[in-house]
Amino acid sequence: MSRKKPPIRPRKRPLQRRAQETVVAILDATAQLLVKEGYEALSTNRVADRAGVSIGSLYQYFPNKESLLAALIDRHLEEVGQVVEQHLPQLAGVPIALAVPRMVRVMVELHQQDPRLHRALFSQLPGEAFLSRRDRLEASLRGLIEAYLLARGVPSERVGLTAFFVVTVVESLTHAAVLDRPQALADPHFIDEVSRLVVPFLEGSCTPLRSAPSFG
Amino acid sequence: MSRKKPPIRPRKRPLQRRAQETVVAILDATAQLLVKEGYEALSTNRVADRAGVSIGSLYQYFPNKESLLAALIDRHLEEVGQVVEQHLPQLAGVPIALAVPRMVRVMVELHQQDPRLHRALFSQLPGEAFLSRRDRLEASLRGLIEAYLLARGVPSERVGLTAFFVVTVVESLTHAAVLDRPQALADPHFIDEVSRLVVPFLEGSCTPLRSAPSFG
Amino acid sequence: MSRKKPPIRPRKRPLQRRAQETVVAILDATAQLLVKEGYEALSTNRVADRAGVSIGSLYQYFPNKESLLAALIDRHLEEVGQVVEQHLPQLAGVPIALAVPRMVRVMVELHQQDPRLHRALFSQLPGEAFLSRRDRLEASLRGLIEAYLLARGVPSERVGLTAFFVVTVVESLTHAAVLDRPQALADPHFIDEVSRLVVPFLEGSCTPLRSAPSFG
Amino acid sequence: MSRKKPPIRPRKRPLQRRAQETVVAILDATAQLLVKEGYEALSTNRVADRAGVSIGSLYQYFPNKESLLAALIDRHLEEVGQVVEQHLPQLAGVPIALAVPRMVRVMVELHQQDPRLHRALFSQLPGEAFLSRRDRLEASLRGLIEAYLLARGVPSERVGLTAFFVVTVVESLTHAAVLDRPQALADPHFIDEVSRLVVPFLEGSCTPLRSAPSFG
DNA sequence: AATGAATGAGAATTCATTCAT
DNA sequence: CATGAATGAATTCTCATTCAT
C-alpha cells in the first residue's frame, strides 16, 4: 500500500535549549502554514523559511515531511488529551443528565481554542497515517467513556457501541459546528441541544440488549 | 493550423459517443487510483495511463487536475443525491418514528455501495474545493429534511439547527461505522440504535423554543 | 544491502524518432560528462543540461540516475561485444601462437577507441551494479575462450581457471597500459610481450592437471 | 585561516594520545562503513557517529572528506608496503623460479587479510585522487622489482616494461581472484599457476631487446 | 579541544501542463 | 481530435562544512 520509508536513520533528539526552540519554531510554522495556506501549499522548505531556520535544521529533527505533520498532530492531541483527562475523572458518580452537559462543554471549549488548526488538522490532512493518530485519541477517550457508562449501569454488552455512538456524535457535532456554524457553538442552546440528543439515548442504554429488539 | 470542419454534418455524431466513453474511462480510472493508491499517488499522467488514453486527451476534457477530481465528486454526489431524492418524498406524511429508520437504512445502503471510494473521497481529498462540493449536497439534503420537519410540526425557529443535527449525526455515524466498524453497519441493531438516538430528539423538537432553555 | 528502488513505474520506451534522438543525446552527454568531469561531478541535471533537453525528458526515459549509467555501460559493452564476437570465431583452428597475438591486437584496438570513456566506465563507477554488468561481458568472453582452449587440447578440468587467467591478464594489461602507459600501447612490442607472456602459459596448459603439482 | 602554533611546548602531550585514539577510531569507522554500506552511503556525519565522536572533532583532524579517505588509503597502503618491503629484500640473489612463488604467496596473503576493505578501496572509490595514491604504491613496488630484475640479468632497456607487466599481472590476478573466485585463492594451485605464467616470461626477458622482434 | 546545532547549495525526482506532429 | 514528447518549476531530502557555546 505504501512505497515509502526506507529504514531512516533516527534523527537527533534536541538536547540543547537552542535546539528545543528550533523544534518549537518548526512546529509553530507548520501549524501557521497549514492554517493559512492549506495542506497542498505546505512544503518543508516553506516551513523552514517561516520558522526562520534552514531546511537542513528541519531535517535534523524530522526525518521527513510526514513526521513533521505527525509531530504537530501529536502535540495538538496531547494538549487535547490533557484537558479531557483532567475533566473526565471528576464525572465519576455524576448522573448522566448532569455529566453530559459538562462533558459537552469541555469538548466545545476544546474545539474553540484553535478552530482553524483543528479544521486543518482533521479535514485537510490526507492519509491513513493521520487518521490513525486521531483514532488513538478517540480510542482512549472511548475507554474513559466506557468506564463511566459501565458505572452508570449500561450493560457490558452494550457499552462498546454506546460509547462509540457518543464519542462520534459529540465529536462530529462540535466539529461540524466549528466549521460550518461557528455562531451556533457560542450559543448556549448548542450544549442543551446536544444534551437533549445524548442524555435520553444513554439513559435508555441502561437495559440489557434484547437479541430481537422490539420496534412497535 | 486547425483541421476541422467536416463538410457534411454527421448524422449520428459517433465521435461524441466516443468522447463520452473517454470521459467515463478517465473518471473510472481516477476513482480506481484514488481507492488503490491514495490521493498522494494520484497524478494526471497515471490516470491517463490507466484510462488507456493519452495525457493529451485527458486535458481535452479536463482543464486541470482539480476539475478532474471535482467531476469525480460530482458524479458520485449525483448518484447519492438521486437515491436520496427518490426516497425522501415518500416520507411525506410518515411519522417520525417510522420515517427515521427508513431514512437511516437508505443512508447505510448508500455508504455500503462503494465504501472505499467514499472513504477516499471524504477523508483523503484535501482542500476547500472539495469540502464545498460536499457541503452543497448536505445543504440540499438539509433542505429536504427541513421541509419534512416543518410538516411534522417542528417550529420554524428550531428547524434549521435540528436538521443540521440530524444530518450531521446520521452522516457521521454511518461514515465512522464504514471506516472503523464495518461489521456494525451490517448489524440490524445499528439502524435501531441510530433511530433510538434520533427519534426522541426529533419528537422533542416539536415544541417552540423558549428563549431561556430550562435546565432543571 | 541496498535501500533503493521502490517499485518504479516503467518508463516510456521512445517510439518516435524525436524521442530516439533525445535518448541518444542523453547518453552522449552522460559519456562526455563522465569523461570530462568524473563520476562525482555527474548529476542528472547536468546531464540534461548538456544534452540540451529538460530534466523532465531525461526522467521520461531513465527512471533514475543508476539506470542512466547502466544504459551507458550497456551501450558501450554492446559495441565491444560486437567487435569481439566478430573476431573470435575466426580463430577456430588457429594455433595458439598465432591466435593470441591476433586476439591481443583486437583487445588493444578496442581499448584505444575511446580510452577516456573506458577509464571512466571501469575505474570510476562505484558499486556492484556496474561490476555485474562488466562481469556479464567478461563471462561471455570467457565462454568463447574456453571453447577455443578446449578445441586446442586444454583438458576440461583446467579450462575454467586458464580462461580466467587469460582474460584477466590481457584485460588488465591493456587496461593498465591505456591508463598509465598510453605510449606503450602504440608500440608493437606491446603485443609481442603480451603474447610472450600468454602463449607459453597456454601451451603448457595442454596437459592434464596432476593433483600434486610438481615444483622442482 | 590557520590556527596553529602552540606557544609553549607541552611536556607530555597526553592529549595527543587521546587524539591519536580519536584518529584511529575515525579511520576504523570509515573502513567499516565503506565495507558495510559502500562508498555511496559514506558521509562524514555517519563516520563521526560510528566513531563515537562529534562531527566537529572529525573536522579537527581531517580538513575534508577527501582527506579522510586519503588517510584511510594511506594507512592501508602503508601496512601493505611494510609487508612487501619486509619480504622483497630477502629475495636478492634468489633465482626467479624460486623468488616468484614466494612473492606471489606474499601478495595472496596480503589480499586475503581484509578482502572486503581491499575491494571497497580499489573498486568503489571514484576519482583520480585515489588512483594516484594506489599508483604511488605500485610505483615503489615496481622500483623494487626493477632492481631485482636488473640483478637477475634483465637488460636495462627492458626492465621498465617487464616490471610493469609483472606487477600488473600479479596484482590483477590476485585482485580478480579475491573478488570473483575467493576459493581459487585458497587453492595452492593458484600460486603455481601464477608462477607458471610469470617465471618463463621473466626468464625470457634476460636477453637484449632486438629492435625488430622476430615472429617466425 | 570537543560538542552538536545550524547551514544551504545542490542532488534526485515528480508531475501538471503545453504543443508540435 | 488524438498522441506522446517535452517542459521546468517545485519538492523532498542529503551532506560536507562552519561556528557558537
Image (cartoon, coloured by chain):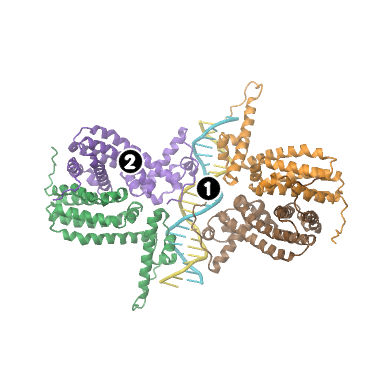
Chain colours: A brown, B orange, C purple, D green, E yellow, F cyan
Residue type at tag 2 = Leu
Residue C137 circle label:
2
Q: Residue at x 63, y 37 (%)?
A: B27
Q: Residue at x 49, y 54 (%)?
A: A7
**Quarter that holds the C terminus of chain D:** top left
Q: Does residue C53 appear left or right of residue B74 in this picture? A: left
Left or right? Give the position of D132 relative to B149: left
Q: Distance between the Cα atoms at labels 1 and 2?
A: 34 Å
Q: Is the residue B12 above or below the residue A204 in the image?
A: above
Residue E16 location, x and y as percent?
A: 59, 43
Instruction: Using the rendered view, name the quadrant where residue C207 is placed.
Output: top left
Q: Which residue is mark 1?
A: A3
In this rendered view, identify the residue nearer to me: C158 or A210.
A210
Q: Position of residue A134 (x, y in %)?
A: 64, 55
- The chain that hosts pointer 1 is A
Dot 2: chain letter? C
Q: Is residue C164 left or right of residue A25?
A: left
Q: Is A119 above or below relative to C197?
A: below
* Label 2: how many Cα within 10 Å (few below 14, some 14–19, many 20+): some
Q: Which residue: 62% across, 38% down?
A: B63
Residue A90 is situated, as x and y percent measured from the top left of the image, at 73, 66
Q: Along the horizontal axis of the image, is A67 left or right of D168?
A: right
Q: Helix, strand, or loop for circle 1?
A: loop
- 10 Å crowding of disc 1: few (<14), some (14-19), many (20+): few
In the foreground, B188 or B38: B188
Mark carried by residue B155: none
Both marks 1 and 2 on one chain: no
